[in-house]
Amino acid sequence: MKSIITSIVAIVVAALVLLGSGMGLSKVAAVNGEKELNEMLATVLPGNTSFEWEEYEGEDDAIRAVYKGETGFVIQTVAYGYAGDITLLVGVSNDGTVTGLVVRDLSETYGLGANALTDTAFLEQFLGTAGDAEIGNNVDALTGATVSSTAVTNAVNAAINFFAANVQ
């Protein structure tokens, strides 16, 4: 009987230690996540040191979040690709052009659409565009990944269209 009670006490103590550790680590994870987001925002909209989240109440389902900086906005957009949602942060300067973009999340096919995450030549095509990006016109699709490429293009254009409709 004594060994059963000792075992139960050990399990309860271990559970409490794990619960306390998890709570402490979740705060650290939240701080690190916010720091990472701010670094990404500053990367896609260079020259800004702080960003203010602005509530978006528009009708465009592609717009998920808006962050105002000193020289423009960063708009978080989501478009459906070949295998799932593609989430981007798109920097738009006060003159209405794309200053940078980063793919935050995607679940596209490895070696094809997943290249949108790391193919800098593909992503650089959007720099300086002003809502006129179009596959086959001024944007070359990723090889074998036209659907994913079109999704990224639509997400970038949605960010520019938001800016044009709400800021200019």
Image (cartoon, rainbow, N blue to C red):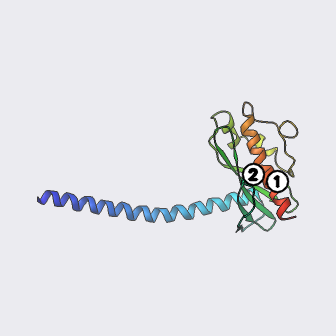
Which residue is label 2 attached to?
101
Residue 114, located in which quarter of the rendered image? top right
Real-space CA distance between mark 1 and mark 2, rounded to the nearest whole angstrom: 8 Å
Closer to the camera, 150 or 32?
150
Left or right: 18 in relation to 49: left
Quadrant occupied by the C terminus: bottom right
Badge 2, how many Cα within 10 Å: few under 14, some, many 20+?
A: many
Which residue is label 1 attached to?
98
Q: Is residue 93 visible?
A: no
Residue appearing at x 65%, y 59% in the figure: 37
Q: Secondary structure at mark 2?
A: strand
> Residue most toward the top?
144
Q: Secondary structure at mark 1?
A: strand
Give the residue type that dot 2 points to.
Leu
Badge 1, how many Cα within 10 Å: few under 14, some, many 20+?
A: many
The answer to whether residue 66 is above or below residue 158 is: below
The answer to whether residue 115 is above or below residue 7 is: above
Residue 121, located in which quarter of the rendered image? top right
Give the residue type that dot 1 points to.
Val
Residue appearing at x 24%, y 60% in the figure: 10
Q: Position of residue 153 (x, y in %)?
A: 78, 44
Q: Is residue 127 visible?
A: yes
The answer to whether residue 8 is above or below residue 109 is: below
* Badge 1 vs badge 2, beta-carbon distance below 8 Å: yes
